[in-house]
Amino acid sequence: MTPAETRLVSRRVALGAVTSLAVAACGDAAPAASSAVASKPSGPAPTTAVATSAAASTTPAAPSPTTAAMEKELVIYSARREALMMPTVEAFQKKTGVKVSVKSGGSAELRELVAQEGAATKADIFFTTDWVDAELLRRKNLLSPHVSPLTEGVPAEFRAADGAWTGVIARSRNILINTNLVKREDYPASVFDLADPKWKGKVAASTLRDGVPIWLASLILLKGEAATLEFFTTLIKQNGMKVFGGGSEVTAAVSQGEFAAGFINHYYYVPKKREGAPIDLVYPDQGAGQIGTLVIPLAVAATKHAPHPVVAKAFIDFVLTPEGAAPMMTMEGEMPLRPDVPLGDHGAPGVLRMHEIKRTAPFDVDKLIAARDRAIEIFTPLFT
């Protein structure tokens, strides 16, 4: 692959009107450019990493690919950071004997690259931390629908109706609580409770990354733009909410007692809780008449012009199985979307399964994309 083939068509601009913000955890979304093999630090330009070792799996064995005509190569364009993606890649490679290469980069950048390459794309699989980018490729007719036998178990709001993309694992948007500073009876039941003056100087959040634009967009659609803007203006301007660079910083600050509460994706909580930090996880807005907790999926799709279409579909089948999903959950503590995939020891006390969460109502995709772009526009001044 030449440098020209691997060069991204544009830099990742997190605040662009159509740019998709990766919902990364601990850098889960691949950086705007990554030039390293999974075991090495990220560099300035996305390149191809080849799996060279296999990850052992203690989960139930996944079914074998259903065709003997499967190709022996697979290329994945992945917005998931290499170190987090490679265990899954290696498990698939061990099972099938397929040589897998991974090109890492930002979700929006890789989506643009697939679009630019068109029929000449090298990508068999587009794996994104932001399902909106997969949906945008679907609308350009650049994905190949594949309804796996396992797709039906994925909730309808986390997959394209035509099978062009499907969610694999997910993260929820929660409130992190320091249990030394907040009594259980005083836990906020809703995100909107944190606008109360009693929380002044006690709340932290991350800037417009880690799924924040999608979260803001969901609130706009559920509560209205004016009410959402008023809420965050109160949080930041009146209550002094501290805005950090990312969810890991928010989690550290709350765990150390610098703040009583913080907005995070749930997987930041898992390792800190396992370490014994005095923290708890609140699933907000679970009561009658409340809006529910936002859940954000990571999605996988086969490209329309995949050079290796059969093995691409086999990879999708694989990551939907317990065997294929386990390495992803192990790396970040994320939750499976299929109800028959056990959480096992991938979570921590207080983490709920998908069917236990009252989720926000499904959104119209067009409205969500428009609301996300609007959220980036109006909230950038507040969050920077």
Image (tube, grey):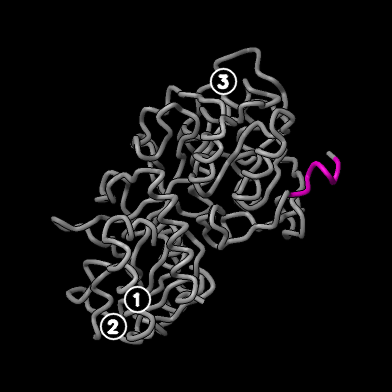
Write the start and end of the magenta stretch as one range.
Answer: 2-8
Query: Considering only order in the chain, which callout, 3 or 1, is on the residue closer to the N terminus?
Result: 3
What separation in Å lies between label 1 and label 2 (alpha carbons)?
Answer: 9 Å
| Residue type indicated by callout 2 | Trp
Q: Is residue 42 above or below residue 355?
A: below
Residue 383, given in percent of the width and then of the height, sits at: 47, 74
Query: Considering only order in the chain, which callout, 2 or 1, is on the residue closer to the N terminus?
Result: 2
The residue at which mark 2 appears reads as 199
Furthest residue to the right? 2
Q: Is residue 106 above or below residue 156?
A: below
Identified at 43% across, 22% down, the residue is: 149
Between disc 1 and disc 3, the foreground one is 1
Disc number placed over residue 65 in the picture, else none: 3
Between disc 1 and disc 2, the foreground one is 2
Q: Is residue 319 magenta?
A: no
Disc number placed over residue 261 in the picture, else none: 1
Label 3 crowd (10 A; few <14 / some 14-19 / many >=20): some
Q: Is residue 263 above or below residue 241?
A: above
| Residue type indicated by callout 3 | Pro
Q: Quadrant of residue 216?
A: bottom left
Q: Quadrant of residue 70?
A: top right
Identified at 60% across, 38% down, the residue is: 126
